[in-house]
Amino acid sequence: MSTTPYTFPDAKGHFGPYGGVFVAETLFGALDELKAAYAAAQADPAFHAEYEYELKHFVGRPSPIYHAKRWSDLLGGAQIYLKREDLNHTGAHKVNNCIGQAMLAKRMGKPRVIAETGAGQHGVATATVAARYGMECVVYMGSEDVKRQAANVYRMKLLGAKVVPVESGSKTLKDALNEAMRDWVTNIHNTFYIIGTVAGPHPYPMLVRDFQKIIGEECLTQMPEMAGRQPDAVIAAVGGGSNAMGIFYPYINVEGVRLIGVEAAGSGIETGKHAASLTAGVPGVLHGNRTYLLQDKDGQIIETHSVSAGLDYPGVGPEHAWLKDIGRAEYQPITDAEALEAFHNLCRLEGIIPALESSHALAYAAKLAPTLGKDKILLVNLSGRGDKDMHTVAEKSGIQF
Amino acid sequence: MSRIQKAFERLNGEGRKALIPFITAGDPSADLTVPLMHALVEAGADVIELGVPFSDPMADGPTIQRASERALARGMTLRKVLQLVTTFRTVDDKTPVVLMGYANPIEAMGLQRFAEKAAQSGVDGVLVVDYPPEEAESFGTAMKAQGMDPIFLIAPTSSAERIAQVAQIASGYVYYVSLAGVTGSGALNVNAVAERLPAIRQKTGLPVGVGFGIRDAATAKRIAVFADAVVVGSRIIEEIEKSTAETACANVKALVADIRRGVDEVKK
Ligand SMILES: Cc1ncc(COP(=O)(O)O)c(C=O)c1O
């Protein structure tokens, strides 16, 4: 690895050939305004103080690290540690980013926030923060996802948000993102778009990463306390890539730490029914940035498949594309079946019900651990809790409530 | 001289403004696209904007989204769009054709290959909605190397610097999006558009087309007073939606001819 410090993105939002600002001219005014507001906030100690206060008192940070000892012993290899983002208020890492962006919206005087959501976790986190700040909130959600995540839809409504089912395209996360962008460009004067992952046009991939890097920063101090040293590998599930960037970013310049992103291989890469854009995609342009995409030979974006709605996305944050190309991070596929097995194991052996997204990272850790010595340490980002997935898991196990 | 430049010079000589209708290639079917293009010309189109369907048309409203979905469902691809232009050119060698679409299908074909094939097919200009000037350097170069015009958008929210940036790289004409929204949105404020035009003309000598939200002859006329070209899209797609395969060409022709009358009421 090179010794020059990692300083991406550049001023134009590029991570090597990836990222950038691939949007219609109509969005530039809003993006410039956002860039300026973010730069001002970054330079303002009061902004950082408020963010820290909110994370501590509203979210419950720092989230602990937990040694999954029984599971590690059973696997018979490396020790697995879990970063407990599932213990955050609203049950996932998504809220870290929502707080940051809602604070920006407040500073910019935008009374209305919008969001896209797949699994519903980002929608719930946005609705929660909007309620906390007294903002109007509209969440776009593919109509397919509205069906599979009914509990989260109700949660958002309880929190005062309006949930708009999106009927266009494949009726999933990517279409919700398209629709949120369309709303934003139409209502720029009073609306802030809270993107839920490290995708979209610059400055979003950078901004979301910055609001999520608290995860890795905490690990940097917690791991030596918990385990006596930094881990040998950091493992995180990758949908758009926000929980992974959040835990990876502070480790990029730490030598000797492998960064492993885990993608949804659905029914298996060879079946074509998956959502593994870094493993099986090619670079292209979607949702305002250049990155690896799942597309057909004519450049149309194709439908993805995963048991986990939060990983069901045909693109990936541009910074992951760059980390893959420069070899700083590696990306591995995990199938639905493997993720479900890890889900059940964590439930039974550790008393923790993980989100299906996070279960992909857990499954890869379970694959890797037995190949390593008992003195090795794996740190897994347990990005969320699995309450929202009860119905999906029950259905897969042939159980009806 | 490019077909686009020729068309604007001819209009200038005649003291008329340009009418630029938009349809999506392959909507409702590939078979109808070339006949629709000829119908547009017969109705008085000066330039045709031909939409290349994309699975994720982020800048388009529901009408053009539906057109894209219909076209894709019937197997339209960028390759086939170019074949349609080739077919159109066997009959019409005069009317400029501008492709309008998104970056990914072009990048999937490869920028160089696309530029060569598009020029061979008889395409005159290309507008890639999600290529703003800062991301379009190689696109602009590739287009110009093949004698095609890279067309760019200017929005109500574009700063003077950005307009200057567009002027640097654009050729053919620039396309002023008359409202902050997606295609097909309702609220068009003609006076606000008129007020913005001088700032654009200060930065570029290219003809200025105005579009988004123009639905009838009366509005087209009011826009044509100060713009060089009037672009009409969603309203034409709606007409296609309302028609059958048998009536589509005639209905579109009648609609566009009516808008043409509105535009021609303005004399330079
Ligand atoms: C718990 C959890 N983990 C991970 C993800 C995937 O998103 P990202 O890759 O941005 O972390 C989601 C998305 O909904 C999620 O809810």
Image (spheres, rainbow, N blue to C red):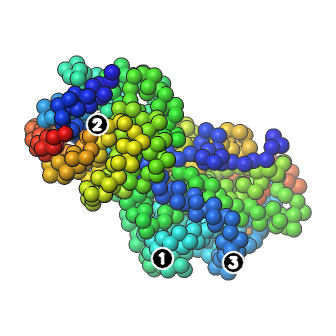
Circle 3 residue: A53
Residue B137 horizontal/vertical position (percent):
52, 34
* Residue B219 horizontal side relative to residue A225, left or right: left
Task: Report which quarter residue A218 is drawn in.
Answer: bottom right
Q: Secondary structure at mark 1?
A: loop
Is residue A53 shown above or below B161?
below
Residue at image point 81% right, 62% down: A220
Q: Secondary structure at mark 3?
A: helix
Circle 2 residue: B49
Q: Cβ of disc 1 within 8 Å of ligand 1? A: no
Residue at image point 29% right, 46% down: B210
Q: Quadrant of the N terminus of chain B?
A: top left
**Which chain does the numbered disc 2 sit on?**
B
Separation of disc 1 and disc 3 at Cα? 19 Å
**Which chain does the numbered disc 3 sit on?**
A
Specify the amino acid type for callout 1: Met
**Which chain does the numbered disc 1 sit on?**
A
Residue A172 horizontal/vertical position (percent):
43, 56
Residue at image point 53% right, 51% down: A201
Mark 1 / mark 3, whichever is N-terminal? 3
Circle 1 residue: A135
**Are labels 2 and 1 on one chain?**
no
Separation of disc 2 and disc 3 at Cα? 53 Å
**In this orientation, which residue lies closer to the viewer: B145 or A342?**
B145
Separation of disc 2 and disc 1 at Cα? 41 Å
Specify the amino acid type for callout 2: Glu
Residue at image point 40% right, 72% down: A162
**Are labels 2 and 3 on one chain?**
no
**In this orientation, which residue lies closer to the viewer: B30 or A235?**
B30
